[in-house]
């Protein structure tokens, strides 16, 4: 593991979110700080090599920051992944992707937490906010009831859906669509060209409160224990979780990473991610 | 079982679709005839009591036709359910619901076929068209690939999505949302008040071709065998299928039926449906 000053350096770089508009940075910093306050004591520090915690391509067009922290043995957290990616597009615009993913381990069946903001321009953002279920909701209606119905999660989706700038968004990957819950917040938000003020208002007045509330629900319902699972169920969760992980890396990273960072750097980053995720715990 | 002339009477009543606009009737008759041509020889006749094959409430505000045919022992079809419901709403308008559902049995893991059109007014229709998967797509990515990716099912959804009158629609039930595939066509189509001509054009030029093509894909991919399953898988399919059936009756029938037909008639119809569906196959 790198010495502690370098560890802090990687984390400092992440929290800068240097390329996104201020309200998106505020949103991400708020979510990450809230998660840290509640869960940091259960986590190992990030052990990724420094040149994978921050990396850029040879032309300097694309930069990225990445932090992965594994949960300690006693924790229900498998790992937390935080990242931002910035890339100057050939079309002249900027692409920004910011992500926060908390994956649980098989000591619990509680849902994961996922948020991602993809900004292809200052007046356009794709938002993904979900508690991806870890069991097939069709086969486990009680699970659906506990985590999604009784928590009223769908009311948050309904709130955002009402905004005139909000349109439904679907991932092109059918597998990714299947991983999300039936209350997933997955929208494309577009304001008129040049009206980045309205975009900032939407983020501050509408997105930030919803994202904070949904994270709060997840922290209270999913990280406080009380969902012990038997051996058969543990095997089921392990198999399903590991499939999701393998397919997500395939779909998310192996497709877009080489385009943004070149094949060599992309393959090094993906291999280091795989290494950390497959190490003990 | 009723004598054959009465059996024909129930089926004749179904195929009339007397309350829906002509293009919707044509769509339903076309789909049902296509299914009949391909599958009728594998089906038992409908054994529902005649007063459940056609029924109306005491005030005469609501009428319904219902046919359920079980598959023969050698068939991969568990049952086919066809129905229409018509109801004069207290608001003065008419509600029309037409459905075609083909459920497979556990000799195969091939997806089911479902279509439903809900018309709360002549210028508004909610369309549902799907091959509901019978396995958790997250746990079975190959299943997703075989039936949904390699068949290009999503292109049909994409075609309809482009129509300006088409908006996304979500079931209020999270369970129902979970039952659908990631390529489900589930839209609300609304034309300007009074413009039922444009609605007819949408049904004829856009819906009918898509519904026919999707049914064709299902008939070719899902009813022609080649998906034999082992004992463990059979048990999994039985459990999942039966849960979907129980929950669907709960959600669909037990909630809306008493409102439309009064509690007594509703409970009789639901109990006859349960009886037919639980009888050997």
Image: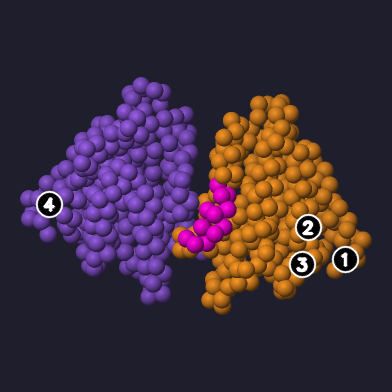
Chain colours: A purple, B orange
Circle 4 crowding by C-alpha within 10 Å: few under 14, some 14–19, many from 20: some
* Residue corresponding to mark 3: B42
For the point 17% across and 57% down, the residue is A47
Between disc 1 and disc 2, whose residue precedes?
1
Is B119 situated above or below B230?
above
Magenta run includes residue B33:
no
Give the letter of the chain under mark 3. B
Across and down, in percent, residue B54 comes to 82, 54
* Residue corresponding to mark 2: B36
Residue A91 or residue A116, whichever sits in front: A91
Determine which quarter of the picture holds residue A17: top left
* Residue corresponding to mark 4: A7
* Residue corresponding to mark 1: B2
Query: Mark 4 and mark 3, same subunit?
Result: no
Q: Is residue A163 visible?
A: yes
Secondary element at tag 1:
loop
Q: Which quadrant of the rendered structure holds the C terminus of chain B?
A: bottom right
Secondary element at tag 4:
helix
Q: Nearer the viewer, mark 1 or mark 2?
A: 2
The majority secondary structure of the magenta stretch comes to helix
Residue B44 or residue A104, whichever sits in front: B44
Q: Compute the Cα span from label 3 to label 1.
A: 20 Å
Is A228 situated above or below A82?
below
Residue bounds of the magenta highlight: B141-154
Disc number placed over residue B13 in the picture, else none: none
């Amino acid at each position: 593991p790198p010495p502690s000053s370098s560890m802090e350096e990687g984390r400092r770089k992440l929290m800068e979110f240097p390329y996104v508009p201020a309200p998106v940075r505020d949103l991400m910093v708020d979510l990450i700080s809230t998660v840290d306050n509640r869960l940091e004591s259960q986590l190992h520090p990030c052990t990724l090599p420094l040149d994978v915690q921050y990396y850029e391509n040879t032309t300097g067009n694309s930069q990225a920051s990445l932090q992965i922290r594994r949960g300690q043995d006693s924790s229900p957290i498998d790992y937390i992944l935080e990242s931002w990616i910035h890339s100057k597009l050939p079309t002249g615009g900027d692409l920004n992707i910011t992500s926060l993913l908390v994956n649980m381990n098989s000591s619990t069946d509680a849902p994961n937490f996922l948020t991602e903001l993809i900004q292809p321009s200052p007046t356009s953002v794709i938002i993904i906010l979900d508690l991806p279920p870890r069991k097939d909701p069709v086969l486990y209606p009680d699970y659906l009831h506990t985590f999604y119905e009784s928590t009223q999660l769908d009311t948050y989706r309904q709130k955002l859906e009402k905004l005139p700038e909000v349109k439904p968004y679907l991932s092109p990957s059918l597998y990714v669509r299947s991983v999300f819950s039936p209350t997933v917040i997955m929208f494309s938000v577009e304001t008129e060209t040049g009206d980045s003020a309205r975009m900032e208002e939407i983020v501050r007045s509408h997105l930030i409160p919803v994202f904070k509330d949904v994270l709060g629900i997840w922290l209270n319902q999913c990280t406080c224990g009380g969902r012990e699972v038997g051996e058969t169920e543990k095997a089921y969760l392990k198999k399903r979780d590991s499939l999701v992980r393998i397919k997500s890396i395939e779909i998310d990273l192996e497709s877009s990473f080489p385009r943004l960072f070149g094949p060599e750097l992309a393959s090094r980053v993906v291999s280091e991610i795989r290494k950390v995720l497959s190490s003990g715990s």
